[in-house]
Amino acid sequence: MRELDLLLQRYLDHTYEHAPETEKSTFIRLLDEPDERLWRYFYADCTPVDSSLAELVLKIRSASPSSP
């Protein structure tokens, strides 16, 4: 899932370093999700049940130049 890797790498390169610790830990939790679920979160307009994950997914989606 190269597209997914690129999307998450973009967040790491541009945002992660300056993010609050809570957001960093949420990102680590996000990475624990299976690839198929991550794909749905970012490309099938599926929203995580966990509100902190949902907020981060929205942030990453909206910052992506290839947002749906």
Image: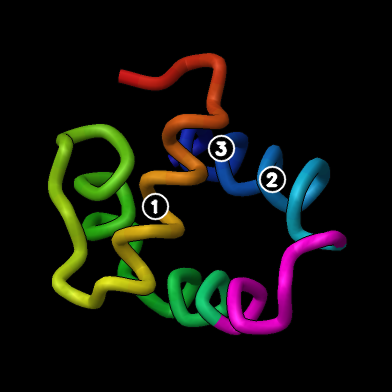
**Foreground tag (1 vs 3):** 1
Q: On the rendered image, what quadrant is the N terminus found in?
A: top left
Question: Along the horizontal axis of the image, is 14 left or right of 25?
Answer: right
Q: Magenta residues, as a range?
A: 18-25
Are discs 3 and 2 less than 8 Å apart at CB? yes
Q: Tell me the colour scheme of the image.
A: rainbow
Give above or below for 29 relative to 67. Answer: below
Residue at 84% across, 60% down: 18
Residue holding disc 1: 57
Residue at 37% across, 73% down: 52
> What amino acid is labelled 2 in the image?
Gln
Q: Secondary structure at mark 2?
A: helix
Question: Along the horizontal axis of the image, is 11 left or right of 33?
Answer: right
Are discs 1 and 3 less than 8 Å apart at CB? no
> Which mark, by number, is residue 9?
2
Q: How many marks?
A: 3
Q: Secondary structure at mark 1?
A: helix
Q: On the rendered image, what quadrant is the C terminus found in?
A: top left
> What amino acid is labelled 1 in the image?
Val
